[in-house]
Image (spheres, rainbow, N blue to C red):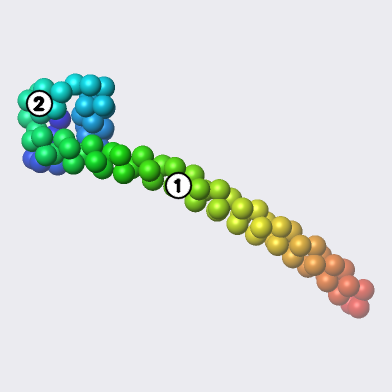
Amino acid sequence: MPTNGRNYSPEFKAQVVLEYLQGKTPSDICREHTLSPNVLYKWHKEFRQGLRQVFEKKKSFDENQSKIEKLERIIGKQAIEIDFLKRGLSMFS
């Protein structure tokens, strides 16, 4: 259902595209939801492009995770160095 004139919610768009993917004919979908076939095909194209991004984000997540682990190791080493320096400084105080 349209939320505001010609603005449709992402949930509505997903529902319509899923109907299309499940085999419902474009003419039936467009008639039922009062849509232009061009709008349906545009949403379907956006949906397919969005699927690619899901897998690209996983790759990005893995890269970020390895960076986080590297930074955590650096922080650990620095914490040990700080502790060592504090102990050395306390010997001179």
Residue 57: give its label: 1
* Residue 43, position as x, y percentages in the image: 21, 39
In what quadrant of the picture does the C terminus appear? bottom right
- Vertical arrangement, residue 45 with respect to residue 69, above or below: above
Q: Which residue is mark 2?
A: 27
- Let me know if residue 15 appears in the view: no
In what quadrant of the picture does the N terminus appear? top left
10 Å neighbourhood of mark 1: few (<14), some, or many (≥20)?
few
**Quadrant of residue 3 in the image?**
top left
- Vertical arrangement, residue 34 with respect to residue 87, above or below: above
First along the sequence among labels 1 and 2? 2
Residue at screen point 19% across, 21% down: 24
Tally the marks.
Answer: 2
Q: Measure the alpha-carbon separation of dots 1 and 2.
A: 34 Å
Residue at screen point 38% across, 45% down: 53
Q: Work out whether residue 34 or residue 4 is closer to the camera in this orientation and state it.
A: 34
